[in-house]
Image (tube, rainbow, N blue to C red):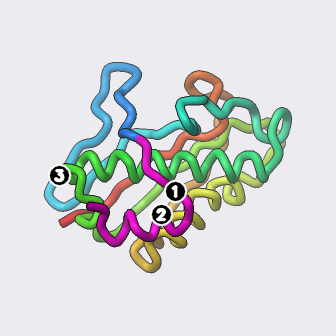
């Protein structure tokens, strides 16, 4: 049975994927008290990587869509951290977003808004968070966006 958060996601046409396994020597999340730290989730949808450099290969809109996939993947990890009960999520605390972009690209915040806007739409006030949005010369596997997050759970 899905809870209220997953019901809201369904209204938005979103079904969470299975939480991705780590691609290297790290764990997907660590819980300390009521905070879950989720490792960076890359722009991947339906098992396909969203790759490219924003400002060269991809538009801002493409980057926004890639950031949204990262947010969906972050929620999948939170669900796994909460033993499948996403309704244990209290709030999004902080996101750090990395955008694979050209040296002269300065709209990283607009790109990471793809994640922030989605989390606000899906979670309401609980989706509002502190945030950083930075440029990267390259990201793992050539992905367009990677986002890590901190989440409060009960």
Residue at point 23% right, 63% down? 153
Residue at point 68% right, 50% down? 65
Q: Nearer the viewer, residue 99 or 15?
A: 15
Q: Are marks 1 and 2 in contact (CB under 8 Å)?
A: yes
Q: Which residues are magenta?
A: 1-17
Pointer 3 residue = 32
Residue at point 45% right, 70% down? 8
**Residue 37 visible in this rendered orientation of the protein:** yes
Left or right relative to 135: residue 16? left
Give the secondary structure at mark 3.
strand
Q: Horizontal and vertical percent for residue 128? A: 47, 72
Left or right relative to 94: residue 121? right
- Measure the alpha-carbon separation of dots 1 and 2: 5 Å
Give the secondary structure at mark 2.
helix
Q: Quadrant of residue 2?
A: bottom left
- Measure the alpha-carbon separation of dots 1 and 3: 28 Å
* Of pointers 2 and 3, the one earlier in the residue sequence: 2
* Of pointers 1 and 3, the one earlier in the residue sequence: 1
Q: Is residue 11 magenta?
A: yes
Using a 10 Å C-alpha cutoff, classify the residue at mark 2 as few (fewer than 14 neighbours), some (14 to 19) or many (20 or more): some
Q: Which mark is residue 14?
A: 1
Pointer 2 residue = 10
Q: Which mark is residue 44?
A: none
For residue 34, above or below residue 74: below
Q: Quadrant of residue 102?
A: top right
For residue 61, above or below residue 136: below
Residue found at the very far front of the displayed protein: 1
**Residue 129 visible in this rendered orientation of the protein:** no
């Amino acid at each position: 049975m899905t809870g209220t958060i997953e019901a809201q996601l369904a209204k938005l046409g979103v079904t969470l994927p299975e939480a991705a396994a780590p691609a290297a020597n790290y764990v997907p999340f660590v819980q300390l008290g009521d905070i879950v730290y989720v490792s960076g989730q890359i722009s991947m949808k339906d098992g396909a990587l969203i790759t490219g450099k924003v400002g060269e290969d991809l538009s801002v809109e493409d980057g926004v869509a890639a950031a949204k996939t990262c947010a969906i993947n972050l929620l999948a990890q939170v669900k796994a951290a909460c033993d499948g009960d996403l309704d244990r999520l209290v709030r999004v605390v902080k996101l750090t977003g990395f955008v694979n972009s050209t040296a002269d690209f300065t709209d990283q915040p607009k790109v990471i808004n793809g994640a922030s806007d989605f989390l606000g739409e899906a979670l309401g006030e609980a989706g509002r968070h502190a945030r950083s949005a930075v440029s990267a010369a390259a990201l793992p596997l050539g992905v367009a966006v990677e986002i890590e997050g901190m989440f409060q759970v009960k």
